[in-house]
Amino acid sequence: MGSPAARQLKQLKPLYQHVVNNFVAVLAAPLAVAAAVSAARAGPGALLAGLQALRAAHVLLAALVPAAAAALYLMLRPRPVYLVDYACFRTRPNCRVPFATFLEHAKLVTFVEGASIDERSVRFMTRLLERSGLGEETCLPPAHHYIPPYRNMEASRAEVELVIFSAIDDLLAKTGISPGAIDILVVNCSLFAPVPSFTDMIIRRYGMREDIRNVHLSGMGCSAGLISVGLARNFLQVAPRGAHALVVSTETITPNYYVGKERAMLLPNCLFRMGGAAVLLSTSRARARFRLARVVRTLTGAGDSAYRCVFQEEDGEGHRGINLSKDLMTIAGDALKANITAIGPLVLPASEQLLFAVSFIARRVLNNRRVKPYLPDFRTAFEHFCIHAGGRAVIDELQRSLGLSDQDVEASRMALHRFGNTSSSSVWYELAYIEAKGRMRKGDRVWMIGFGSGFKCNSAAWECIAPARSAEGPWEDSICRYPVDIPEVLKH
């Protein structure tokens, strides 16, 4: 419950926030009243005499200088970028992998020639799945349903085409835009970079223009979706006004099934699942649904531990996979702190910034260690949070670090349960969940947070212009069943 003093401070906090966040209005109101009273006492004669004393040059400067400053500001300020709409890949029932299916498949892989995975590894993956937060409806690509799993180029390309073409088809149908009207194309996929590239595949499939600016980002990890949004925003700054940028985020699972027995490399087998998203950005506000407010990127890869904490390599027997360090959560926490430090001053209200500054001065400048570090309340800056669904531990750590409620992280937990870790597209499944639940309102602010190899923590802040009119999308057939209770250990 807290002490009486703490409860009183908590009750006074809304008043404090109102006064500090509206400081200019609070200060200007009495000054305006004082000026009006002074003018009334002086009378109209004194005011007229003062105006006549002003020279024509003064009047001209008073008019031209603000006008010139306003014109310069409008010319130099970045163009606003808007989210027209987005679409997520809708998983197929024939790709569904319940726990029993996944584990039986893993047991059969132990008999495959060349695979090192053994019964001990299967027991380890069983314990991981029981505590993972994943549900029984997550999906793996068709190639992983075979024994042994197909990991060749043909199967990998088939997964790419299934996921990204399905998402783009849905997006084009929702927006009604022609592929020929797209000026910029940015695609990210970390672990599969074929030749020709993903952008070439999309351009060929949809017959896009020859002069389209296109980039395929690889190796950037699960936060690459927000990097792609930032890159598309930068392209739009120099493109003709009203240009459109298509951003596609996915991860190809097919070539990355690990058949060794290193425990640190078995975790991705249990968490990563099929998924992808297509997003249409524009500098035109027409039919826009969100406005992009900020993109903030932080990279901690200068340190060896951060650089190697998510590392693609071969084990001692030559099996390739992703090695996840035991220090991953600590490194993610440090990256989050760096990102919070960068984005906080840009989004937090003055009341939170003032409390943080006072705490910082007391601890660092006055060297008073009895003062606890003040954790800003980001719920004063955002109504919704889309935290990368990298795993239950990731969501738990961010909830604790940011002081969020269970409802604040509900979208992340439910996206992990329903779809698994879909890498860079997970934040879009979470945004779709919030909208499918009917919780988004005009003016609501959304914070997307992504983590990725390197090690990176990236953020994007959005403001809602027009909420979705319906629950169409990846949650259409399951939103009525969510939220669900997710036990600490799932028995099956």
Image (cartoon, rainbow, N blue to C red):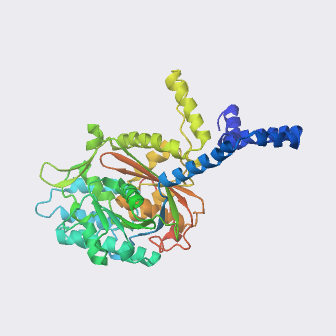
Relative to residue 322, is residue 52 drawn left or right? right
Residue 350 in the image: x percent, y percent?
Answer: 60, 41
Above or below for 237 versus 87: above
Residue 445 in the image: x percent, y percent?
Answer: 55, 56
Relative to residue 399, is residue 269 drawn left or right? left
Specify the quadrant of the image occupied by residue 178.
bottom left
Specify the quadrant of the image occupied by residue 250.
bottom left
Q: At 52% across and 54% down in the image, what residue appears?
A: 74
Q: Which quarter of the image is occupied by the C terminus?
A: bottom left
Above or below for 373 versus 23: above
Above or below for 469 versus 37: below
Residue 431 in the image: x percent, y percent?
Answer: 48, 62
Relative to residue 161, is residue 431 drawn left or right? right
Q: Which quarter of the image is occupied by the N terminus?
A: top right
Q: At 30% across and 46% down in the image, what residue appears?
A: 454
Nearest the viewer among 134 and 19 is 19
User: Looking at the image, can residue 315 be seen?
Assistant: yes
Specify the quadrant of the image occupied by residue 48.
top right
Above or below for 139 versus 235: below
Q: At 29% across and 62% down in the image, what residue appears?
A: 215
Residue 115 in the image: x percent, y percent?
Answer: 14, 59
Looking at the rendered structure, the number of numbered marks drawn on it comes to 0
Relative to residue 465, is residue 251 drawn left or right? left
